[in-house]
Image (spheres, rainbow, N blue to C red):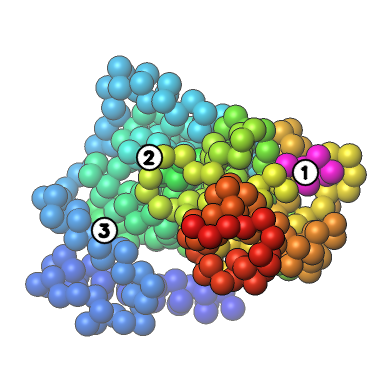
Amino acid sequence: MKQALTTAAERRLQQIDQARRAVMMEGGQTLGDTLVDFWFERAWIERSWRRCLSMGQRPEHHVTFDMIPAQALRRTEEANHCLVQAARPVLDQLGRAIANTRYFAILTNASGTVIDVNGPIDHTDQRAHLITRIGTDLSERSVGTTAIGAALAERQPVWLHRGEHFFADTSVYSCAGAPLFGPDGDCVGMLDLTGVETMERPELKHLVTQSARHIENALTLTRPHHLLVRLNWPGRTLGEDTDGLICLDTDGWVTGANHAARQMVPQLMAPSAAPAHVSELLALPYDMLFDAARRNKFGDAEALEVPLWSGLRLHALALAQGQTSPATARTGYAADERMPLKDMEISLIRKAVDEAKGNVMQAARALGISRATVYRKLGNKNTRQP
């Protein structure tokens, strides 16, 4: 078995070497022409290599692992204080998880500058010491293709091993990385797990991705909020790191949301300087969430099945400020045992008509439905023609 693993590892390194020659030394043909099986789902490495080549970098150039100037470092530490505080408990847990693997954790800001580290770092080894100094520039422009530069450029979790790094000087490393997205949806940094001349462990990509989500959730919860709405698809247990998190103020305006929530609710992904209101995201009267939070505060956590404007449905758990991690959440098919989905729909339409002062056409436009649908759902009571 050990010999088989060794043979597989050697074959992997041979494939990497062949890929490097294809891009950097043999006319620059695309890897898709020569290594289709090897390069499936790994085209991001070729893109990174080509970015490095376009910046005038060459694999044989030496890497100096420069630190940013002292004044810039002070500004960087101040600007990333919240990120470091949110990440520190996760870095401590990671340090324990990888203690016997000769890997360590690196946290960078959005520019690829090291802002925190953890794990079994051998500072007597310059190859480990140089990249774990606070303030070291590990951006793609500075050190070429690494998990750090690639995760920040590609905005996706990555794993790369030895010669998949651009420079010969960095081919001793193996690393996994995942980008970190802040409560406003911007990429604020990345989390990296690196080993020096150690075994390839692609499973670390899953670990670093999961840990990155935990940091994003902690960062989101630092936003001032009156209500926290946890979201997930029906059938999933609410209260886990995979939940979407939306923070609301007392009037239902979004003060922050994690990356998972932005993936579930497309309106949160739209670039806009204006704040979003929860009524623009969920197709129900937003005060229902505040009512549910009050009930949850005094009893078992109860999830609602809420409609999106797209017609899809999510489970939602509304929690008052400070009540962020329910042990259990009762979920069911109905949107709310006190209000069936049909009644919720009618309540939403009636609310729109009331806000339009009885103008059915205006309410129908706001809801994105026809005037006939409004009349059919509500009848002719309390409505007037435009």
Residue 212 shown left or right of residue 225 in the figure:
left
What residue is pinned by disc 3? 48
Residue 125: quadrant of the picture: top left
CA–CA distance in space, label 1 to label 3: 50 Å
Question: How many callouts does the rendering have?
Answer: 3
Determine the CA span between mark 2 and mark 3.
Answer: 31 Å
* Residue 294 included in the magenta stretch of the image: yes
Q: Indicate the secondary structure of the residue bearing disc 1.
A: helix
Name the residue tied to disc 1. 291
The x and y percentages for residue 47 are 25, 62
As measured in the structure, the alpha-carbon distance from the residue carrying label 2 to the one carrying label 1 is 29 Å
Foreground pick, 53 / 321: 321
Within 10 Å of disc 1 (Cα), the crowding (few <14, some 14-19, many 20+) is few
Q: Amino acid at mark 2?
A: Ala
Q: Is residue 186 visible?
A: yes
Q: Are marks 2 and 1 in contact (CB under 8 Å)?
A: no
Look at 26% across and 72% down and name the residue there: 19
Magenta region: which residues?
A: 290-296
Residue 197, position as x, y percentages in the image: 43, 53
Amino acid type for the residue under numbered disc 3 = Ser
Q: What residue appears at the point 61 percent right and 35 percent down from the top-left corner?
A: 251
Q: In terms of depth relative to the viewer, which is nearer, 157 or 282?
A: 282
Sooner in the amino-acid sequence: mark 2 or mark 3: 3
Q: Quadrant of the N terminus?
A: bottom right
**Which residue is the site of mark 2?**
273
